[in-house]
Image: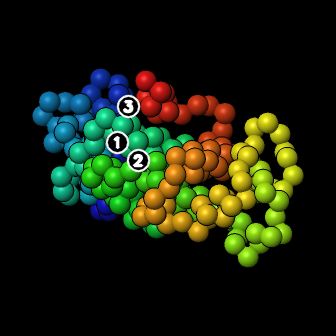
């Protein structure tokens, strides 16, 4: 058995569920939960997002069969935009993480993310912090401009996800940001340092560009929830 969280679930036939789990030892796994929709199933109220679980499965191939699932503690109670933020992160993990690849450092960050959302900590910086941890796991963290480079850089910089910060204009889709703001963001502790509205806006755009090569062209469903 190992710790895990449900990322998403779908109906499967009349009485079963397909469940995408984020687990400590195996990363993202897709499981068949036979009979989970039956009224008598002990899994009926357990296989939900944001509940710390202990799970076990068996079988061959990519689709494993769930054999055990129990809640390890209470669920993280998320409301309103904090709930949508949780759905966004879950969908992001589904989209970019390959199956059966352990990412233990990222798994350790996930409960911290949920706790911050449950405590109603600032959403923008909380999401950007977790996105950065995800980029690190994907081997795609980029270098921020450094203070000692300030005099060597132009006043305006341009960011694209596949090339990082550039001194030359790339195209209309790149993020335009001042040199000093880019340096300040790179030096900030996003969870604890207050950021201006402009800094939060540009940080969001930068992280979106950085993740775009992994997400692809299909829009994330969770982003539509925020627009509502």
* Disc nearer the start of the sequence (2/3): 3
Are discs 2 and 3 less than 8 Å apart at CB? no
Residue shown at the point (68%, 61%) measured from the top left: 180
Residue shown at the point (43%, 29%) measured from the top left: 225
Whole-Å distance between the Cαs marked 2 and 1?
7 Å
Residue shown at the point (23%, 31%) measured from the top left: 37
Residue 142: percent from the left, percent from the top? 68, 62
Secondary element at tag 3: strand
Is 80 on the left or on the right of 61, as rendered? left
Residue bearing mark 1:
82
Residue bearing mark 2:
123
Are discs 2 and 1 less than 8 Å apart at CB? yes
From this view, report whether residue 85 is shown above or below residue 196: above
Q: Nearer the viewer, mark 1 or mark 3?
A: 1
Secondary element at tag 2: helix
Mark 2 is surrounded, within 10 Å at the Cα level, by few (under 14), some (14 to 19) or many (20 or more) other residues, namely: some
Are discs 1 and 3 less than 8 Å apart at CB? no
Quadrant housing the N terminus = bottom left
* Disc nearer the start of the sequence (2/1): 1
- Looking at the image, which is closer to me, 8 or 177? 177
From this view, report whether residue 34 is shown above or below residue 207: above
Residue bearing mark 3:
10
Quadrant housing the C terminus = top left
């Amino acid at each position: 058995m190992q710790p895990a969280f449900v990322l998403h679930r779908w109906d499967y036939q009349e009485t079963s569920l397909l469940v995408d789990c984020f687990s400590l030892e195996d990363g993202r796994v897709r499981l068949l939960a036979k009979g989970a929709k039956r009224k008598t199933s002990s899994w009926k109220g357990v296989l939900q997002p944001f509940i710390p679980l202990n799970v076990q499965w068996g079988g061959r191939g990519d689709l494993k069969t769930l054999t055990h699932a129990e809640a390890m503690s209470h669920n993280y109670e998320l409301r309103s935009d904090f709930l949508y933020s949780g759905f966004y992160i879950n969908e992001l993990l589904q989209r970019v993480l390959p199956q059966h690849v352990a990412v233990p450092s990222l798994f350790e960050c996930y409960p911290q993310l949920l706790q911050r959302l449950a405590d109603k900590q600032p959403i923008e910086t909380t999401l950007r912090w977790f996105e950065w941890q995800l980029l690190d796991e994907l081997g795609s963290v980029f270098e921020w401009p450094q203070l000692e480079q300030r005099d060597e850089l132009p006043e305006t910089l341009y960011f694209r996800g596949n090339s990082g910060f550039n001194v030359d204009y790339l195209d209309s889709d790149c993020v335009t940001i001042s040199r000093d703001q880019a340096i300040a963001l790179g030096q900030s502790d996003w969870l604890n340092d207050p950021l201006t509205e402009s800094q939060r806006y540009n940080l969001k755009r930068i992280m979106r560009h950085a993740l775009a090569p992994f997400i692809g062209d299909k829009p994330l469903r969770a982003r539509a929830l925020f627009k509502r």
